[in-house]
Image (cartoon, rainbow, N blue to C red):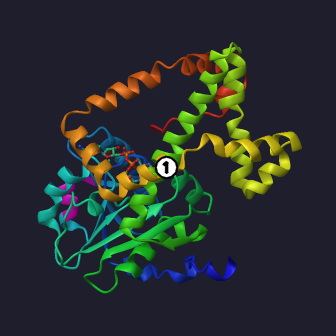
Amino acid sequence: MTDEFTTTVYTDSDAESAQLANKTVAVLGYGSQGHAHAQNLDDSGVDVVVGLRPSSRSREHAKDDGLRVATPADAAAEADIVVMLVPDTVQPSVYETVAPELDPGDTLQFAHGFNVHYGQIEPPEDVNVTMVAPKGPGHLVRRTYERGEGTPGLFAVYQDATGEASAQALAYAQAIGCTRAGVIETTFREETETDLFGEQAVLCGGVTDLVKAGYETLVDAGYSPEMAYFECLNELKLIVDLLYEGGHMEMWNSVSDTAEYGGLTRGEDVVDREAMEAILDGVQSGEFAREWISENQANRPAYKQYRHAEQNHEIEEVGDRLRELFAWGEESKEPAPADD
Ligand code: NAD
Ligand code: MG
């Protein structure tokens, strides 16, 4: 295995900060990623302008954080690097307004490949098209940077018009702190397809359905909702922390032999590999993307229904009640974004 493991991990010494000297970066959007990129770039001495609509409530936040703010089109007009950090579903319409401002040799940069990979944004041939994607939510990108650390990240080059697209993406990754932790290279296709597969089959979809199915199986068999909640949801955190820290063996070594034997012999029965392959097929063929794009065009009727059902699942009410009763609820909550 080790001789096949040839991935290069790029760190600070691989990045040339000179790539961003005399360049202006327009960060479009000031949400999770946008606020972190813009402030980290600014602290790294890069000239930043935040692009937001005149009606955006984020404008005040960006100004309070000491940043220049302009409309997306004006920000793009003065920038050499335009970074799309508005929600993926909004990017095509924001792109329409900034496209006329992309000069030959400029860079259009993303933090996720969806719109380029599925043809929702088709940049002109004379601009660089790159991706720099921290592997973590924005508040961690900001917080780790302030501590002198960084969040690991990915970079990719879809189109290299200047011959310097990679070097520039690495310099950007350095300026937001990612090369302090390590950055690996990927492609728009690989990042998009693995990201969608992961969130559907494993991380967001797979895990929540596993928890709900376990909970319902116990409750339907007459066990108490509280016990089912602790067993199937609350304890998941302990297991995930062990996996994250030291891999599967760290987890197996930390649980009882009984848990280990039971888990090793029974776990695979609950996973449907064919269903997983079908999910991957839907991602690769573009079927999922087409469904999600038309769902958005129709104002999200199915999305709203699924969300409603999820909100009204019994496990939510039981969880609210238990978190209220026990001490772990408040302290482990994400801090609300600072207003000052
Ligand atoms: P977000 O939803 O947190 O923030 C979006 C921001 O865009 C808003 O705060 C607002 O300032 C602006 N905005 C919203 N609607 C707009 C509109 N109609 N016109 C103009 N501006 C508008 O978004 P995010 O989660 O930071 O995602 C940005 C990009 O980063 C996406 O491509 C996403 O896939 C990618 N990404 C996100 C994460 C993450 O953890 N959140 C991680 C890696 C990559
Ligand atoms: Mg994702």
Q: Tell me the residue that label 1 is attached to.
A: 274
Identify the residue shown where x is 73% and y is 54%: 248
Name of the residue lying farthest toward the bottom: 163
Residue 67 is one of the magenta-drawn residues: no
Q: Position of residue 35 (x, y in %)?
A: 41, 51
Q: Is residue 127 left or right of residue 215?
A: left
Identify the residue shown where x is 81% and y is 45%: 260
Closest to the observer, 219 or 12: 219
Q: Is residue 301 left or right of residue 308?
A: left
Identify the residue shown where x is 54% and y is 17%: 314
Identify the residue shown where x is 24% and y is 39%: 296
Closest to the observer, 262 or 171: 262
Quarter of the image with the N terminus in it? bottom right
- Identity of the amino acid at label 1? Glu
Q: Is residue 127 left or right of residue 30?
A: left
Predominant SS of the magenta segment: helix
Q: Which residues are magenta?
A: 69-76
The vertical placement of 157 against 205, above or below, is: below
The vertical placement of 312 against 43, above or below, is: above
Q: Secondary structure at mark 1?
A: helix
